[in-house]
Amino acid sequence: MKLFKIPAVIALSLFAAACSQQSEPEPVYVEPEPVYDKYGNPV
């Protein structure tokens, strides 16, 4: 049973280290849609 625990602990620690090193994605800036009057001209 001890032989199974050692690789499991190593695998979990490597997985946790890989997850913690990922950078957060940059926020996506949403631009508002242009507004048009009743003739189709941009306001």
Image (spheres, rainbow, N blue to C red):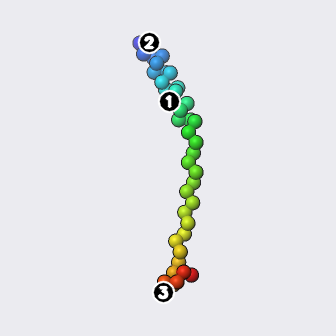
| Pointer 1 or 3: first along the chain | 1
Nearest-to-viewer mark from 1 and 2: 1
Above or below, comparing residue 9 to residue 43 in the picture: above
Q: Nearer the viewer, residue 2 or 30?
A: 30
Q: How many marks?
A: 3
Q: Could you tell me the amino acid type at mark 3? A: Lys
Above or below, comparing residue 36 to residue 17 in the picture: below
> Where is residue 42 drawn, in percent x and y?
54, 81
Above or below, comparing residue 21 to residue 41 in the picture: above
> Where is residue 25 drawn, in percent x and y?
56, 48
Which residue in the structure is indicated by mark 2?
3
Q: Quadrant of the C terminus?
A: bottom right
Identity of the residue drawn at 52% across and 27% down: 14
Identity of the residue drawn at 52% across and 83% down: 41
Tag 1 near tag 2, CB within 8 Å: no
Q: Give how far apart the Cα atoms at labels 2 and 3 are.
A: 75 Å
- Which class describes the residues within 10 Å of circle 1: few (<14), some (14-19), or many (20+)? few
Pick out the residue farthest to the top.
2
Which residue in the structure is indicated by mark 3?
38
| Pointer 2 or 3: first along the chain | 2
Q: Quadrant of the N terminus?
A: top left
Secondary element type, mark 2: helix
Pick out the residue farthest to the front.
41
Nearest-to-viewer mark from 2 and 3: 3
Q: Could you tell me the amino acid type at mark 2? A: Leu
Identity of the residue drawn at 57% across and 45% down: 24
Q: Which mark is residue 15?
A: 1
Q: Could you tell me the amino acid type at mark 1? A: Phe
> Where is residue 18 drawn, in percent x and y?
53, 32
